[in-house]
Amino acid sequence: MSEQAGALVLFGITGDLARKMILPALYRLTADGRLDLPIIGVARTDLDLDGLREHVRAACGGVHDAAFDKLAGNLRLVSGDYGDPAVFARLRDEAEGKGFLVHYLAVPPSLFASVAEGLAGEGLNREARLVVEKPFGHDLDSARALNAELLKYFDEDHLRRVDHFLGKEPVEDLMVFRFANMLLEPIWNRSYIRSVQITLAEDFDVTERGGFYDANGTIRDVVQNHLLQLLAILAMDAPPSKDARAQLDEKWRVLRAVQPISPADVVRGQYDGYLDTEGVRPGSTTETYVALRAYIDNWRWAGVPWCIRSGKAMPMTDLEIVAELRRPPVAMFANGGAPDSPNLIRFRLQPDAGVTFDLLAKEPGRQRTRPVPVSVDFTKVLGPLEAAYERIMADAVSGDPRRFARFDLVEESWRIVQPVLDLPDPPLVYARGSWGPQPAQDIPPGGWHEISTTFD
């Protein structure tokens, strides 16, 4: 269902996620004239309403007074412990007469079921939608158990599971490139694509998040959700209609065709010094890096390796997809007997966004070819991109499900990574600022392509 919200209830309004991402997004939506409704904050806090408004102002940074005054005027506060039924009774009173409610849970996943139960106890699950942040479960069984708990109080049509990557504008650009341009579709299959490489690199370490990260690791933190969602968008067939359900169905179909990942197709790493981080267990075998191969058993992609790598403490922060095309059947322009470089299609998603086609051209004065990048920087051509949480919050209010993860997609993602969760072998140690353990270089056929650093 896609009911428009009459009020937004934000659990965890004083928390870290709200401060960094959600509150600035709500301010920008308000300043742009796209959000004007009561925002009821629920938190375990000693702040009063005036204190909350000052907290929100600080979180939003430089603000225009008129826009902030509008946002501040829409704020309400219900304080108390989420385990106290009286909190939900006060919330019921505050929400009375405000129409359809959107309950956004920016709280730890361990609280999802108890908050849903508390809402239901006061009838606040009727004429309402529940939005929960990631992670959704810790493995396949726990995801199914959590879903069963939430379905006691909210049906699937009134549940939204956040994956903020789906709110990134460059991710949506992938859909546009694939299905609005006839340039790509004829070659976007196993006959022309040799391999696809997806890299999510971060140049920072786990810093103060040692306890959280050590309980999860790279596969749970970004592969099961973000990167498999990217794979689905890249590999799916065109939806038969513009309906949101049709798009989600195609993503489910392609994830359903992905084989469970074999431990033989995975290299796990841990950056040097990780074990000295506060909150990390002595002798921890949690990975801070992973490289893996996945295979899709369908007519479009059978036999094509989809290679994914992600890690902390790497040389740069970057999110890039590289599709390597097969070489021509006859090497007419081989360089001194060596084959020409392959054509590459690069989608750069962060820190800046754009697309590059690596083509071959004749080197002047020489009988050999050289790769020539043909690039478009989206920011320079199209202007600034909208922040991910602006789109997530706007869709939470409107009910549009496209940028959320339906449970059958979450379930398939856990199925795919289940065989490589919590492997007993210790991860390989790699140096900070490197591209991970050396054996990971052999995951793609021919090795990983160098990451682009500019569109110039």
Image (cartoon, grey):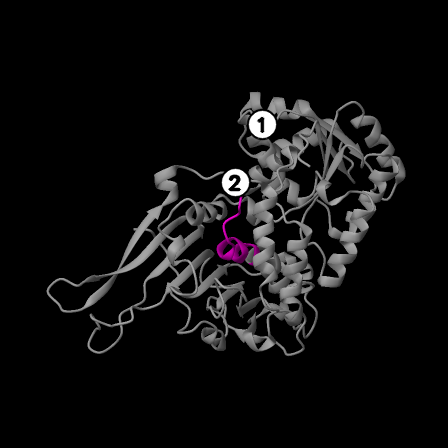
Q: Position of residue 254 (x, y in %)?
A: 56, 58
Q: Residues within 10 Å of mark 2 (few under 14, many from 20)?
A: some
Relative height, residue 77 to residue 421 (above, below): above
Label 1 belongs to which residue? 30
Is label 1 in a helix, a strand or a loop?
helix
Q: Residue at x 29, y 68 (%)?
A: 328
Q: Residue at x 61, y 55 (%)?
A: 252
The image quadrant of residue 332 is bottom left
Q: Residues within 10 Å of mark 1 (few under 14, many from 20)?
A: some
Q: Position of residue 106 (x, y in %)?
A: 70, 44
CB contact under 8 Å: marks 2 and 1: no
Instruction: Looking at the picture, tell me which residue is in the foreground, 53 or 189.
Output: 189
Q: Is residue 206 visible?
A: no
Instruction: Looking at the picture, tell me which residue is in the foreground, 331 or 280.
Output: 331
Amino acid at pointer 1: Thr
Q: Is residue 218 left or right of residue 102?
A: left
Instruction: Answer with mark 2 or mark 1, whichever residue precedes in sequence.
Output: 1
Label 2 belongs to which residue? 387
Span shown in magenta: 228-241
Image quarter of the N terminus: top right
Is label 2 in a helix, a strand or a loop?
loop
Relative height, residue 104 to residue 336 (above, below): above
Q: Is residue 174 visible?
A: yes
Distance of label 2 from label 1 (alpha carbons)? 14 Å
Q: Residue at x 49, y 43 (%)?
A: 169
Q: Position of residue 62 (x, y in %)?
A: 53, 31
Q: Is residue 39 left or right of residue 163?
A: right
Amino acid at pointer 2: Ala
Q: Residue at x 73, y 29 (%)?
A: 100
Q: Is residue 93 left or right of residue 244?
A: right
